[in-house]
Image (spheres, coloured by chain):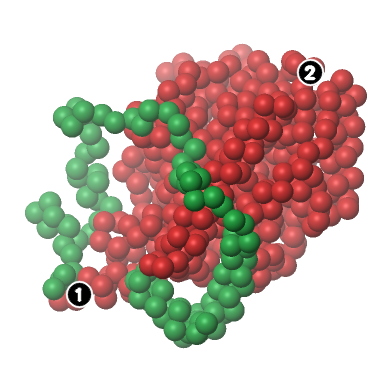
Chain colours: A red, B green
Amino acid sequence: MFPPQCSQNSLISSLSIRALREKVREDPDFLFSYIEEIYKVIEKHEHQLRAYITVRPKEEVLRDAEALLKSNNLGPLAGALIAVKDNISTSGIRTTCASRMLESYIPPYDATVITRIKNAGGIIIGKTNMDEFAMGSTTENSAFYPTLNPWDLERVPGGSSGGSAAAVAACEATAALGSDTGGSIRLPAAYTGTVGLKPTYGLVSRYGLVAYASSLDQIGPIGRYVEDVAIMLEVISGHDPKDSTSLKVAAKDYGSYVVDRPIKTYRIAVIEEMVEEGVDREVMAVFNKTLERLESYGLSVEFRKMPIIRYSLPVYYIIAMAEASSNLARYDGLRYGLAQEVEGRLWTEVYKRVRSMGFGKEVKRRILLGTYVLSEGLYEGYYLKAAKVRRLLYEEFMRLFKEFDLALSPTSPILPPRLGEVIDDPLKLYSLDVNTVPINLAGLPALSVPGGFIRGLPVGIQVFGPHFSEGWLLNVARLIEVAGK
Amino acid sequence: MDWNKLVKHLSDLALVDLQEDEIEPLLRDLEKIIKMINAVNELTVAEDIEPLYTTFFGDVNLRDDAEVGESTDIEKVCAVRERIENGYVKSPRTL
């Protein structure tokens, strides 16, 4: 099921990566018609949705297509138009992080994921809107404008990778890249009816990803189909010597897991604390229906308590804000980003002024709070304590996955909020991430797949598992996808 | 707690200047968020629990401290900054 922007147009715009690849291999000129079609969707709907910060001129993209066909590099992504979150470096294409601080920054290099996408035959179509420096859950924290949800233009698309998810849902791109620090791929996927995957920490290179909270950040794919996400993951994963935390693991054939039957009799856990208070009744109905469908495949589902998971939200925000305050110290107005006249002025004056003008409200709030939890006399009670609780949470997950193969939860406790509904209350805003942040704290892989619809709004199901269980997640996601058709 | 004093102190430490109209909503939000993160103090954690700072358990990729071969073109790198003189970034005074 696609939102109106997609279904109003020809079937071409909603092609899967595989279908597009087969068509292009059969008739290379088809790629030009496909590009024309996607730009028609953009011309018609982008002024409302505002999923992008930068859309590359069509002529440039057509030239890339011509070069691709000439090189005969019709790899796994042959001709796919990939939208990229604006915190991933793209050589020669503006990378703003949706911040005034980097409004005119044009990186001199590609992130490793971008190099891999290009090598696989993908073409970058543009850079997508996001919460500034990935800090937010609705894409309303963009310094430029909010992105709207294609299913209901009065609602948010989730965040922080809201532009990527909205572009994919509305057929303004074939697939997209997002980044996920506490749910920033999964939440927008849930709110836009797309599939979004956050890989195991270290599986995908972070080289070229603008850092927010380095122990939690991961790049991952967003697609309209589970198979698209599997193909994208296969392309972008694997060891990269340029990232000191890249794992030395071989790339897997993730596509082979996307089959319409369970490849094993999964034992599935539901953590009671993730489905208790605060979860909308209608969201729970879709979730329960999904469990029933999985049980009909012969899979077992059991409920388990994990009391420590209740502390995930405070632990996450302490750690993320501490790391953010340190990572964002690099915006000094000298090396890149917003600049100030320096002649005769003291560096503290220039530094303070640049940061005051360049950062938005949420970024300043997180820098100040990060400074607070790291400050003398408070460090032990906040940051150190949070790191210890993180260890306990991690060990609980390891115990859980000795008994179970995977776990399920609603991705978001509620349906997509209306614009302005949560943005003025930080606690309401942060609570959207309640089921997604524990996964990042433990470095686990997780995805969100549409489980059903309520009054025309999608409901996302989160599937997560032990490290490197991406194949199983994709297999179960495919079962949920098939059942929803 | 004197929240005004705290915000001023944090703004000095973090070198982030705040405009007058930013302070009032920030005070309100900080109070709420600090209450939320104080929940970690409900938990008693044994002293010998090893803090977990990263979930990366592989070998950290380090390279030899030697020439790496091809690198990004220096002119391309400098092009992102306007105030370059003789290959140096012009900075404000430190003293």
Q: In which quarter of the image is the N terminus of chain A?
A: top right
Q: Quadrant of residue B42?
A: bottom right
- x, y percent for residue A40: 64, 43
Label 2 residue SS: loop
For discs 1 and 2, the disc positioned in front in the rendered view: 2
> How packed is label 2: few (under 14 Cα within 10 Å), some, or many (20 or more)?
few
- Residue B16 falls left or right of residue A147: left
Total marks shown come to 2
Which residue position is annotated with label 1? A346
Residue nearer the viewer, A250 or B73: A250
> How packed is label 1: few (under 14 Cα within 10 Å), some, or many (20 or more)?
some
Q: Are marks 1 and 2 on the same chain?
A: yes
The reply to whether discs 1 and 2 touch (Cβ–Cβ < 8 Å) is: no
Q: Which amino acid does label 1 sit on?
A: Leu
- x, y percent for residue A83: 55, 41
Residue A121 visible somewhere in the drawing: no
Q: What residue type is labelled 2?
A: Thr
- Residue A165 falls left or right of residue A6: left
- x, y percent for residue A373: 46, 64
